[in-house]
Image: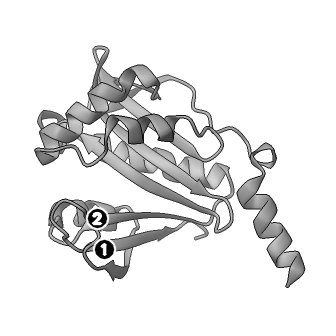
């Protein structure tokens, strides 16, 4: 029992034992259109908040929340997608080193760029990244009533795990916890 606790303690409290998460900037083709993909930085935060406002009416994540996330290079990685140097989408992830899980903390695509394959590209990229890190699963939460997102996640290998009652702070809607097994 002590050895298991010691392993947990080292994996969750010793950032020097964990690699800094990194991503090399690249140009990619998504549905026949060229986009730039790179790591998010502090200068992007206001744009990320604005994208969330366009999607939800009110940003679920504050400027400060994004700022805190971007300051955790050992267990957080955020990517942005650019069209002609304008950010049109992003994804945020958190590594749970103890459970070998990559959790999608948030994903947002500007409404005029939705349904163009950007979200699929980002999630698929992170599935490969998680496998590279030797993680066993990916997870996320999604609103129960967000049927189109749930269908997208299911098509990418995510399966419903359980309901998290009253999960969302704004309207107390339930969330579905979904997980994709990466060991197959």
Instruction: Give how far apart the Cα atoms at labels 1 and 2 are.
Output: 5 Å
> Could you tell me if residue 99 is visible in this image?
yes
Q: Please determine whether, in this image, residue 125 is positioned above or below residue 169.
A: above
Residue 142 tag number: 2
Q: Reply above or below: 53 against 18.
A: above
Q: Quadrant of residue 64?
A: top left
Q: Which residue is drawn at 25% across and 75% down?
A: 166
Q: Position of residue 90 (x, y in %)?
A: 35, 37
**Residue neighbourhood size for the residue with mark 1, other residues' Cα within 10 Å, grouped as few (<14), some (14–19), many (≥20):** many
Q: Position of residue 132 (x, y in %)?
A: 66, 49
Dot 1 falls on a residue whose secondary structure is: strand
Q: Can residue 88 be seen in this view?
A: no
In the depicted view, which residue is nearer to us: 147 or 177? 177
In the shown orientation, is residue 143 left or right of residue 30?
Answer: left
Residue at image position (55%, 49%) is: 128
Quarter holding the N terminus is bottom right
Q: Outermost residue, top direction?
A: 84
**What sort of colour scheme is used for the picture?**
one colour
Q: Where is residue 177 in the image (x, y as percent from the top left)?
A: 37, 73
Residue lying farthest to the front in this orientation: 64
Sequence order check: which comes first, mark 1 or mark 2?
A: 2
- When asked about the image quadrant of residue 148, the answer is bottom left
Q: What residue is pinned by disc 1? A: 176
Element on which disc 2 rests: strand
Residue, x 10% and y 44% (percent of image)? 57
Q: Do the residues labelled 1 and 2 touch (CB within 8 Å)?
A: yes
């Amino acid at each position: 029992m002590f050895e298991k606790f010691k392993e947990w303690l080292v994996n969750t409290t010793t950032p020097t034992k964990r690699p800094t998460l990194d991503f090399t900037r690249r140009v990619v083709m998504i549905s026949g259109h060229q986009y730039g993909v790179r790591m998010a930085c502090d200068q992007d935060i206001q744009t990320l908040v604005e994208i969330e406002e366009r999607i939800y009416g009110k940003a679920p994540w504050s400027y400060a929340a994004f700022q805190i996330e971007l300051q955790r290079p050992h267990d957080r990685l955020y990517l942005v997608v650019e069209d002609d140097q304008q950010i049109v989408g992003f994804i945020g992830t958190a590594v749970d080193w103890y459970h070998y899980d990559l959790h999608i903390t948030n994903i947002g695509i500007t409404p005029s760029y939705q349904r163009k394959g950007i979200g699929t590209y980002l999630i698929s990229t992170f599935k490969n990244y998680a496998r590279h890190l030797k993680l066993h699963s990916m997870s996320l939460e999604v609103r129960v009533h967000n049927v189109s997102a749930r269908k997208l996640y299911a098509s990418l290998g995510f399966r419903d795990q359980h309901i998290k009652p009253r999960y969302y702070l704004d309207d107390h809607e339930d969330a579905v916890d979904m997980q994709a097994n990466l060991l197959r």
